[in-house]
């Protein structure tokens, strides 16, 4: 398309609307993440809200709506910094969250994440067959907003399917908050001298994501589920006799303290292998970016969809960010007994941030392509970053630090980890957004610039929200925490891990066994590839081990349902149309629950009560579980039958 015909894209009203949504979504995500350890993806809800708002304004376009969701998507990812920074309060290093330092860690890491992911676009988006489930879903939503396209009848039908599935998904999630039905079901039982369990969330959003990721990833995650809950949990509970707690608490403790570290070991090896496999296309992407920069300098006009941020700008911004990051690290060391090692530690930290940050950006970008941004186990990357930075610190100083400096050592590790965590979170999100942009004909550099804006908006709001919550509730394990303290589970785990490594008490046994299993899983996947059988990506298997079972089960179920539907769709007279309507069905399931997540997060944040909508007490649990299972299964079957009827 000629450049003059390019529709409006990076507009002030789009940036403003995206900024407002970012502020709201970030506040909601911070609360929910600290409360239950999970956040919700904001790209799709932002796209839906953007279309609803901008459609009433003149000249609204699909690329403009895409910019709004790109800005707002920072809320769902940058807020993940809460998985690290509360650890600084838990160890007593901070009494609150200083605005400049907290915002600085989030903003510098987030912007660096955008920069480091720019040269990855060609390798992981343009020249890759990764499914990018949420990127595809967001593109389907945005495409429905384009009323000027051909095939208006199909667009209207697709919009109908999207709306009805969204309403069903949101309605079930809302009903679950009344506790008349429960949105999760699980049972825990003894297995000989050990124990295990089975269960899952009744989540239409996770079911929809499972549909979009496909059978290969779903099968790999199912394998991880078997390794974790059929093999490891019964074995390890046998070795650790039941304490004076319930079977559920016993199994849960073993999973958190043992199995997740095994999964982290698998993830580490799988991540390294993934990096080795994508190294050539990544380097090719960097060479392409350099070539594009030279062509631009020579006056060659590049196609709009090929225009990334110039590689010279990427390099300059990345290097300039090292100065504020160095100041953040120095702030931790100043006034402590570690100050005399300040130059060495700051230099080591900056090198670590650049090298590990680039590796993390590549791996988390691959994760986004594999299973989606909202389901990428970023807390696992946080664990690995904390491990690596702790090892780096031991390499620089050894274990000769005195007791007075032990708090500063852990604070230093958490600060470095916080910056790296922001890098990988935003890279994870950026590549998903760029996939959406590729599908709707967006200009890459405009999306990359928009995400920088979103990072700034998110970094501004995170510190005051954290301070309000810390003052009102506190965090479990922090000095002075009250009875309603927020769990902040990932931050507690990462800070405990950092202290354990620095003191020599880390769970190296399970990490090591996980690494051995990772090598075996890589060999299995490569063998299946040579035999031309269904592949089992080792990183997806690691997710199945590491993620809580309640998240993995609906993902696997969604992959099976999606596979059955697509096999049916391929036999229809118009298979592409049938497959597309199936994608819209899955997208609607994601959209509805995501929009309700936004609404409920605001209700909880305003009321301070996560049971604000409850109509019955816990005594109604039995009927609520049965009712939830029956309703969820009935709605799933009914929604897919309706799509098949319309697609036939």
Image (cartoon, grey):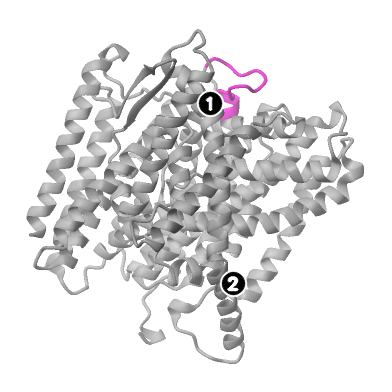
Rendered location of residue 81, percent (x, y)? 58, 43
In which quadrant will I find the C terminus? Answer: bottom left
Above or below residue 583? Residue 494 is: above
Mark 2, other Cα within 10 Å: few <14 / some 14–19 / many ≥20: some
Rendered location of residue 28, percent (x, y)? 45, 38
Q: Relative to 82, is 187 on the left or the right?
A: left
Looking at the rendered image, the disc whose residue lies closer to the viewer, 1 or 2, is 2
In which quadrant will I find the N terminus? Answer: bottom left
Visible residue check, residue 503: yes
User: What's the magenta bit mostly, secondary-structure-wise?
Assistant: loop
Residue 487: which numbered mark, if any? 1
In space, the residues marked 1 and 2 are separated at their CA atoms by 41 Å
SS of the residue under disc 1? loop
Closer-to-camera residue (162/536): 536
Rendered location of residue 494, percent (x, y)? 62, 35
- Location of residue 482 by image quarter: top right
User: Which residue is pictured at 15% across the width and 66% down the height?
Assistant: 575
**Magenta stretch holds residue 476:** yes
User: Which residue is pictured at 18% across the width and 57% down the height?
Assistant: 567
Residue labelled with disc 2: 283
């Amino acid at each position: 398309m000629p450049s003059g015909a390019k529709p409006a894209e990076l507009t002030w009203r789009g940036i403003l609307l995206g900024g407002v949504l970012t502020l709201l979504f970030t506040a909601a995500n911070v609360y929910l993440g600290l409360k239950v350890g999970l956040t919700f993806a904001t790209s799709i809800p932002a796209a839906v809200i953007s279309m609803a708002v901008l459609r009433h304004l003149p000249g609204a376009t699909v690329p403009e709506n895409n910019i709004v969701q790109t800005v707002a998507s920072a809320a769902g990812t940058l807020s993940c910094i809460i998985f690290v920074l509360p650890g600084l309060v838990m160890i007593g290093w901070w009494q609150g969250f200083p605005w400049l330092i907290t915002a600085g860690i989030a903003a510098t890491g987030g912007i660096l994440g955008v920069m480091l992911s720019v040269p990855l676009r060609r390798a992981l988006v343009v020249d890759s067959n990764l499914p990018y489930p949420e990127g595809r879903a967001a593109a389907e939503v945005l495409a429905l907003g384009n009323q000027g396209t051909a095939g208006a009848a199909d667009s209207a039908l697709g919009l109908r399917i999207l709306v009805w599935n969204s309403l069903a998904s949101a309605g079930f999630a809302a009903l679950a908050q009344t506790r008349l039905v429960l949105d999760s079901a699980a049972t825990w039982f003894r297995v000989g001298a050990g124990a295990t369990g089975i269960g899952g969330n009744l989540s239409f959003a996770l079911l929809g994501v499972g549909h979009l990721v496909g059978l290969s990833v779903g099968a790999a995650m199912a394998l991880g589920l078997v390794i974790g809950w059929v093999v490891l949990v019964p074995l390890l509970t046998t070795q650790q006799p039941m304490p004076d707690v319930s079977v559920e608490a016993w199994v849960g403790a073993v999973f958190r303290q043992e199995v997740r570290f095994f999964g982290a070991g698998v993830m580490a090896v799988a991540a390294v292998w993934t990096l080795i496999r994508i190294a050539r296309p990544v380097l090719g992407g960097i060479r392409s970016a350099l070539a594009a920069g030279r062509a631009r300098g020579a006056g060659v006009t590049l196609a709009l969809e090929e225009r990334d941020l110039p590689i010279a700008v990427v390099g300059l911004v990345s290097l300039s960010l090292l100065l504020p990051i160095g100041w953040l690290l120095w702030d931790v060391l100043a006034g402590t007994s570690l100050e005399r090692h300040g130059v060495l530690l700051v230099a080591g930290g900056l090198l670590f941030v650049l090298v590990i940050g680039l590796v993390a950006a590549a791996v988390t970008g691959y994760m986004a392509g594999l299973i989606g941004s909202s389901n990428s186990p970023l807390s696992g990357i946080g664990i690995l970053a904390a491990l690596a930075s702790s090892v780096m610190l031991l390499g620089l100083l050894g274990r000769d630090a005195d007791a007075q400096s032990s708090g500063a050592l852990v604070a230093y590790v958490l600060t470095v980890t916080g910056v790296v965590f922001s890098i990988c979170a935003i890279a994870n999100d950026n590549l998903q957004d760029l996939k959406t942009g590729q599908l709707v004909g967006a200009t890459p550099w405009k999306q990359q610039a928009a995400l920088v804006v979103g990072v700034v908006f998110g970094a501004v709001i995170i510190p005051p929200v954290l301070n309000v919550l810390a003052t009102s509730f506190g965090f479990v394990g922090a000095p002075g925490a009250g009875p309603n303290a927020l769990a902040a589970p990932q931050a507690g785990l990462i800070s405990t891990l950092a202290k354990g490594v620095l003191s020599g008490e880390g769970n190296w046994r399970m990490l090591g066994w996980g690494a051995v299993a990772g090598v075996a899983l890589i060999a299995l996947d490569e063998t299946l590839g040579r035999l031309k059988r269904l592949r089992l990506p080792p990183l997806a298997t690691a997710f199945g081990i590491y993620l809580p079972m309640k998240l993995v089960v609906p993902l696997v179920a969604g992959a099976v349902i999606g596979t059955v539907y697509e096999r049916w769709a391929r036999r229809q007279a118009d298979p592409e149309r049938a497959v597309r309507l199936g994608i819209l069905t899955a997208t609607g399931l994601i959209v509805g629950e995501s929009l309700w997540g936004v609404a409920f997060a605001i209700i909880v944040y305003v009321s301070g009560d996560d049971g604000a909508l409850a109509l019955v007490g816990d005594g109604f649990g039995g009927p609520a579980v049965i009712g939830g299972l029956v309703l969820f299964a009935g709605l799933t079957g009914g929604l897919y039958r309706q799509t098949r009827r319309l697609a036939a």
